[in-house]
Image (cartoon, rainbow, N blue to C red):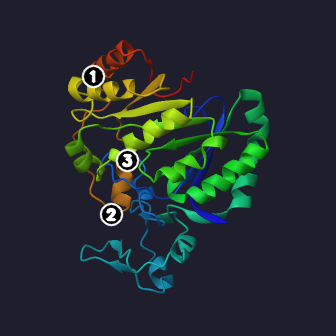
Amino acid sequence: MEAFIANIQHFNVHDGTGFRTVVFFQGCTLQCKWCQNPELKSRIPSVLYHKTLCVRCDACLQVCKNRAISITSRGELTTDTSKCSRCFCCEEECYYLARRFSSRRIELKAVLKEVMKDEIFFRRSNGGVTFSGGEPFVQHEFCLQLAKELYKNAISVNVETAGHVPWQSIEKLIPYIDTFLYDFKLIDSKKQLYWLGADTAIIMDNLKKLSAAHRRIVIRIPLISGINDTDEEFGAMMNFLDTLETIRTVHILPFHQLGSLKYEMIMENYEMSDKEVNNQARIMACAEIAKKHGYFVDIGGSSFI
């Protein structure tokens, strides 16, 4: 069994208890305008072109069998992704690391072998493996088999999910997951359609089902200035959480611009450059709202109770 894996990142401390090895999966069902990993939204590998590293040796042009790479009128390289077959020849030929793909197909055994290199750190720190992305449940069968293998080895597994997937994809993994890190972004339906690119009623429906079936769920809210950090919107989100059975912890994740360069690399327009970062006044106001609702609040997402 194989999956498109973007990265296996070692020694993380913000994705669950202890040291975590995070497996980043390709593919997502949402189109969040503030996404910090936009190269993982497509279900197949995205082409990333870092033009400041490109020396225009044109080696990529020469090896591209489908002629997906061409030169614009401004003398810059561009890629027609509809012609690209993901043969990875251009990436392999680029010695300056200007061209790369967001993920590769990797076999289950290879992923398991890589994460198990950190087994001693998991044992000593009460850590484990976290599935992230993208949206891990886009490749849910692979997630299920990997979680089962880790469960056999008594390794803790967390999943970071937006919940915008069929319930069955989540339900199958419940017996093998210690903690669900559940992204909760908006509750207003019009805002959902505009900012997330989808009607996300399924997110709240799945969260209701999950809270009835699993006792350890951490709500993670990426706080975006003027979008979900208002008293009205954030308060409505807390009111919804109050109707659920097992929610105790809310992580507030302040907005940043660290992923903005990636949009240029995948030739997509970035619409969030005017949004304020690290708005302390609104961060603290939203934290107080959540605390008044009785939730343990962590700003930054590193504390787990």
Mark positioned earlier in the residue sequence (2 or 1): 2
**SS class, disc 2:** loop
Quarter of the picture holding the C terminus: top right
Circle 3 Cα neighbour tier, 10 Å, few/some/many (<14 / 14–19 / ≥20): some
- State the residue at coordinates (52%, 64%): 96
In the rendered image, the vertical position of residue 261 relative to residue 98, given as above or below: above
Identity, as a three-letter code, of the amino acid under mark 1 = Arg
Residue 119 x, y percent position in the rendering: 77, 40
In the rendered image, the vertical position of residue 235 relative to residue 29, given as above or below: above
Q: Label for residue 202? A: 3
Residue 281 x, y percent position in the rendering: 27, 19
Circle 2 Cα neighbour tier, 10 Å, few/some/many (<14 / 14–19 / ≥20): few
Residue 221 x, y percent position in the rendering: 39, 33
- Along the horizontal axis of the image, is 25 left or right of 21? left
Identity, as a three-letter code, of the amino acid under mark 3 = Ile
- State the residue at coordinates (40%, 81%): 83
